[in-house]
Image (cartoon, rainbow, N blue to C red):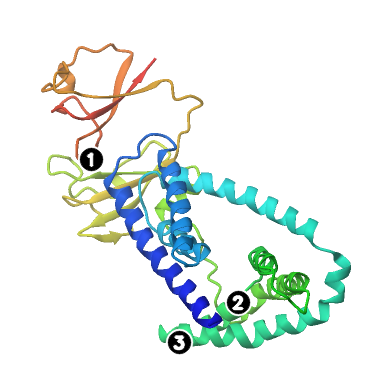
Amino acid sequence: MLDFFLLKQVLIGLLIGLIFSYITYKIIEKLDFNDDGLLTIFIIAIVTFTFSFTNLISGNGYLAIYVLGICIGNQFYKGKREVIFFFDGLTNIMEIGLFFLLGLLSNPKMIVENLLTSFFVAIFLMVIARPIAVYIFMKLFKKPLNQIAVVSFAGLRGAAAIAFAIMAINQGLALESDVFHIVFGVCLISSLVQGFLLPAFSKKMDMIDPNDTVLNTFNYYMDKTPIGFIKFKVEKSTNLINKKVKDLNLSFNVIVAKIIRDNKTIIPKGDTSFEENDIIIIGGESYFGDSNHDLKEFTVGPFHSWKGKKIKELDISKDILIVMLQDSEGNVVAPNGETLIKGGEKIITLEK
C-alpha cells in the first residue's frame, strides 16, 4: 500500500510539473510582461499554485515544482534575466536560513554516535544504489560508460536530503533509529568523499572539457555578465552585401559575434562575407545607467499627432531622441529618419 502511495505521488508530481511548465511557457509567450517585476510575480504565483494543486490531488508538490523549474529554466524568453537575478538571491537567502536551522536541530554528539551507520549507508548509496539506478536509466539513452560513471559518482547528498529526513520525522512515525542524524552523517561523508574526489575522477574518466563553460549561450552571457548582444538583418538596401567582416572598420569596442544564415550559424572570420538576409549578432559591453528617469515610453494612439509621419517629419526638440520603436507585433525597430510611424507602436525616447 505504501509503495502504491509513493508511486502515485511521483507520477502525479512529474505529470503536473510537465503540464504546468508547458502552460506557463505558452502564457509567457502570449502575454506582455514588460512592466518591471511583473514576470517574477507571475512565476512565483505559478510555483505556489503548482505546489498547492499537486498536493491537493495527492501528488508530490516538491517534485512538481522541481520539474517546473527545470523546464522553465531551460527555455529562453523576454524578461528571464530579471527572473534569474531574483531567484538567485532568493536561493541564497533560503540556503542560509536552511543551514542555520539544520545547525540548530543537529547535535554533534548524536552525529558521532550514528557515524558508523551513516558510513555504511553512504557507501551503499555511492557504490551500489546510485550506480545501478543511473546505469539503468542512462543506458536507455545509449550514453557512454565514462559519462554514466561520472553521473553515478556525482550524487552529492546535501541539505535537501536532511530536510526530507525532518519531514519523515515530523510524520510522527515510530522510528527505531535516529534518521535525522544518520542522514546528516551521510551528507557529511558524501560531501567530503565525493566532493573531494569528483574533479580527479572526472578527469580520469576524460569528462572534463577545458574549453567548456556553463555560460554556453548568448542568453547566459547576457544574464550573468556585463556583455550585451544586439542583432540586425542585412537588407537588400544596405551596403553590407558581399562586404567582408574585416572591412567594417569597427571603431568601437564591439565585435561581430555570430552570423545566422538560413537558420545555420556561421563563425565570423575576417574574410567572411555578408549576404542578403543574414542575421548579424554584435557583441559588446552592456550599459547600465544610474537612473532610468532619462528614458520615456509611450504608445502612439489612433489620434496621436505622430501617426502617419516619418521620424524626420516630426517637430521634436533637439534634446529628445527616439531611441527605439516596438511595433504592435512586438518587433523591435532601430529608427532612422525614414521610419514611418503607423500607430500602435511603443516609442522609447531619450530626454535631457
Above or below, 300 against 330 in this view is above
Quarter of the rendering containing residue 41: top left
Instruction: Give the amino acid at mark 2.
Output: Ser
Numbered badge on residue 331: 1
**Residue that mark 2 sits on:** 202
**Residue that mark 3 sits on:** 139
Numbered badge on residue 267: none
Instruction: Give the amino acid at mark 3.
Output: Lys
Q: Secondary structure at mark 2?
A: helix
Q: Position of residue 119 (x, y in %)?
A: 77, 81
Quarter of the rendering containing residue 234: top left
Q: Position of residue 10 (x, y in %)?
A: 48, 73
Q: Residue furthest right?
A: 109
Q: Position of residue 113 (x, y in %)?
A: 87, 75
Q: Nearer the viewer, mark 3 or mark 2?
A: 3
Confirm or deny contact between disc 2 and disc 1 (CB under 8 A).
Answer: no
Q: Secondary structure at mark 1?
A: loop
Q: Residues within 10 Å of mark 2 (few under 14, many from 20)?
A: some
* CA–CA distance in space, label 3 to label 2: 19 Å
Q: Residue at x 89, y 68 (%)?
A: 109
Above or below, 293 against 12 in this view is above
* CA–CA distance in space, label 1 to label 3: 44 Å
Q: Residue at x 40, y 43 (%)?
A: 39
| Near-viewer residue (47 or 7) | 7
| Near-viewer residue (119 or 117) | 117
> Would residue 26 be found to the left or right of residue 251 on screen?
left
